[in-house]
């Protein structure tokens, strides 16, 4: 019997923007039973252009996951291929439409071997929790994060820095090829949880708050709570699109015996 089952869900809020330019989705792999993918993208680049870029991330991720086979492919290689292909398509579309859209990307893949592999580009994040306890999150490819790593800015000051929305690595940039950061965790177990989210969500929460929300609620309940709370905390500002995907590993219900005891008759 499996040591855990997967519960997952996604949610979005347009915030105070004129258009929803984030995208998120959950997929299974036709050629790889037991593999699950969660994808999130935050498009940028003006009306319709940003949405198109984020939509391309979802479309390309699904296409590659549909073709993925653990017998011939690696998850890391597939995720890098997704990023490269998205980058190329966005640049081509930008050339033909005279726009300059771009997008972030964060993708998580869970395997039946109890492994998790993820990749990200930009400042959309993946959080990993063990029960309610924060374990790690991806490091943003942003200008302020570079300043933090160089000791020029504290992490607390970076959160509300006026240049916090400046990214140094995106998909679709006309000036530079993207670099893809890969992470992984082995030995998944019941109680583990993952959160993929755009900066319109993570900006308003501490790591501990996110962990508690996921641990104490189902994915649907946690999604509703986090978006509601993000909207409350953004009051008085022009809040960005808010998007998330939650993947939780929960213990399967205990099996209840269904047999009945019947009286045996003695044969004479």
Image: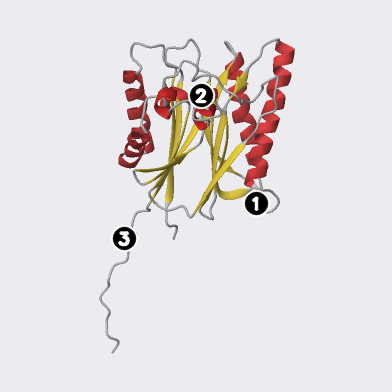
Give the class, few, some or many, for how many residues have Cα within 10 Å of label 2's Cα (few <14, many ≥20). Answer: many
In this figure, which colouring scheme has been used for the structure?
secondary structure
Foreground mark, 3 or 2, reads 2
Kind of element beneath mark 3: loop
The label on residue 70 is: 1
| Image location (x, y in percent) of residue 63 | 66, 35
Q: Earlier in the sequence, mark 1 or mark 2?
A: 1
Residue located at (67% from left, 28% from top): 86
| Image location (x, y in percent) of residue 61 | 62, 34
Q: Quadrant of the N terminus?
A: bottom left
> In this orientation, which residue lies closer to the viewer: 73 or 145?
145
Kind of element beneath mark 2: helix
Residue furthest to the left in view is: 263
Q: Compared to 163, does 125 lie above or below?
A: below
The label on residue 117 is: none
Q: CA gap, disc 1 to disc 2?
A: 38 Å
Foreground mark, 1 or 3, reads 1
From the image, tell me which residue sits under label 2: 144
Residue located at (33% from left, 23% from top): 228
> In this orientation, which residue lies closer to the viewer: 163 or 125?
163
Q: CA gap, disc 3 to disc 2?
A: 54 Å
Give the class, few, some or many, for how many residues have Cα within 10 Å of label 3's Cα (few <14, many ≥20). Answer: few
| Image location (x, y in percent) of residue 39 | 54, 34
| Image location (x, y in percent) of residue 59 | 62, 29
Q: Quadrant of the C terminus?
A: bottom left
Residue located at (67% from left, 21% from top): 173
From the image, tell me which residue sits under label 3: 256
> In this orientation, which residue lies closer to the viewer: 28 or 208?
208
Left or right, 265 with reference to 104 = left
Left or right, 40 with reference to 227 = right
Callout 1–callout 3 Cβ contact below 8 Å: no
> In this orientation, which residue lies closer to the viewer: 94 or 207?
207
């Amino acid at each position: 019997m499996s040591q855990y089952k997967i519960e997952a869900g996604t949610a979005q809020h347009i915030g105070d923007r004129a258009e929803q330019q984030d995208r998120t989705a959950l997929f299974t792999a036709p050629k790889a039973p037991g593999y699950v993918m969660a994808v999130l993208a935050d498009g940028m680049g003006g009306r319709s252009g940003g949405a198109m870029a984020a939509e391309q991330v979802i479309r390309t991720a699904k296409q590659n996951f549909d073709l993925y086979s653990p017998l011939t492919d690696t998850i890391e290689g597939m995720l890098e291929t997704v990023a490269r292909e998205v980058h190329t398509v966005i640049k081509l579309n930008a050339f033909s439409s005279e726009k300059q859209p771009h997008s972030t990307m964060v993708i998580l893949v869970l395997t039946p071997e109890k492994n998790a592999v993820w990749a990200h580009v930009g400042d959309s994040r993946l959080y990993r929790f063990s029960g309610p306890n924060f374990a790690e999150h991806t490091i943003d490819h942003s200008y302020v994060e570079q300043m933090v790593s160089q000791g020029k800015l504290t992490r607390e000051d970076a959160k509300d820095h006026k240049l916090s929305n400046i990214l140094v690595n995106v998909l679709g940039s006309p000036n530079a090829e993207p670099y893809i950061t890969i992470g992984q965790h082995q030995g998944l177990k019941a109680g583990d949880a993952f959160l993929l989210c755009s900066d319109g969500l993570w900006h308003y929460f501490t790591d501990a708050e996110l962990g508690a929300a996921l641990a104490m609620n189902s994915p649907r309940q946690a999604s509703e709570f986090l978006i509601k709370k993000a909207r409350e905390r953004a009051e008085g500002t022009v809040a960005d699109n808010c998007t998330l995907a939650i993947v939780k590993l929960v213990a399967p219900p205990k099996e209840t015996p269904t047999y009945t005891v019947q009286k045996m008759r003695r044969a004479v």
